[in-house]
Image (spheres, rainbow, N blue to C red):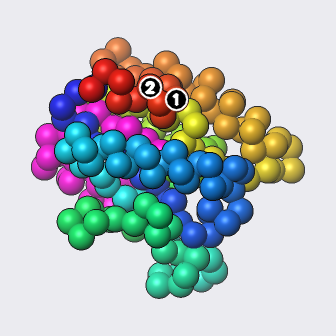
């Protein structure tokens, strides 16, 4: 693991955990990764989905980041309104100011924000490690959540440019080489 790594926690909000595929197990794995990152002094950056109305309206209980993985006082938290965590947020500036070159990506929703953010990160010059068991979603009218997750682990693994790519590994493997 590169020293210039950050853990990006995307949309792990109360509403998502309440409705997600294997929500509690997923949350436990993310909580463990955050603890490991903090032990290794890897910055943890939070992204929170925000909308004008509904479950993601600012300051509603369902909009809050889940308390089990709540940010610490100095952790950056950025609100976004699109699938791309970089779009309309100061995320890129934050990462550049810290000299970050690699992102570990976890969170919601596999086929939207995780996919888009991971691909965009590679396009911006970051290497991405996607925790295969730390992104989740919901059943759709076409596929079960388990299938969506497996599909994205398969299609995102190896996606990249000549200089940067997405690596997909389990949460247990992420810090083994640290």
The residue beneath circle 2 is 173
Hey, which quadrant is residue 103 in on the image? top left
Left or right for 88, reference 107: left
For the point 44% across and 25% down, the residue is 173
Which element is circle 2 on? helix
Question: Residue 26 or 46: which is nearer the viewer?
Answer: 26
Left or right for 126, reference 132: left
Q: CA distance from mark 2 to mark 1?
A: 5 Å
Which element is circle 1 on? loop
For the point 48% across and 34% down, the residue is 171
Residue 16, position as x, y percentages in the image: 62, 63
Left or right for 69, reference 39: right
Residue 6, position as x, y percentages in the image: 28, 43
Question: Residue 63 or 49: which is nearer the viewer?
Answer: 63
Residue 142, position as x, y percentages in the image: 86, 43
- Count residues near mark 2 (Cα–Cα under 10 Å), then give few for <14, some for 14-19, many for 20+: few
The residue beneath circle 1 is 170
Looking at the image, can residue 81 be seen? no
For the point 50% across and 25% down, the residue is 169
On screen, residue 149 above or below 74: above
The numbered dot on residue 3 is none
Residue 33, position as x, y percentages in the image: 41, 43
On screen, residue 96 above or below 167: below
For the point 62% across and 62% down, the residue is 17
Q: Which stretch is magenta?
A: 84-106
Check whether the beta carbons of the residues at disc 2 and disc 1 lie within 8 A of each other: yes
Quadrant containing the N terminus in the rendered view: top left
């Amino acid at each position: 693991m590169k020293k210039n790594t950050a853990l990006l926690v995307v949309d792990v909000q109360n509403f998502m955990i309440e409705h997600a595929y294997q929500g509690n197990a997923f949350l436990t794995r993310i909580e463990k990764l955050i603890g490991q990152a903090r032990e290794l002094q890897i910055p943890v950056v939070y992204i929170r989905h925000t909308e004008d109305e509904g479950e993601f309206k600012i300051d509603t209980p369902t909009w809050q980041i889940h308390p089990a993985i709540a940010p610490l006082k100095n952790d950056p938290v950025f609100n976004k309104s699109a699938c791309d965590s970089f779009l309309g947020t100061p995320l890129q500036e934050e990462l550049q100011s810290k000299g970050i070159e690699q992102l570990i990506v976890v969170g919601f929703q596999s086929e939207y924000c995780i996919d888009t953010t991971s691909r965009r990160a590679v396009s911006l010059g970051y290497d991405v490690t996607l925790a295969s068991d730390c992104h989740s979603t919901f059943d759709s009218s076409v596929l079960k959540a388990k299938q969506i997750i497996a599909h994205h682990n398969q299609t995102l693994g190896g996606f990249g440019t000549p200089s940067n790519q997405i690596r997909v590994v389990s949460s247990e493997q992420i810090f083994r080489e640290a």
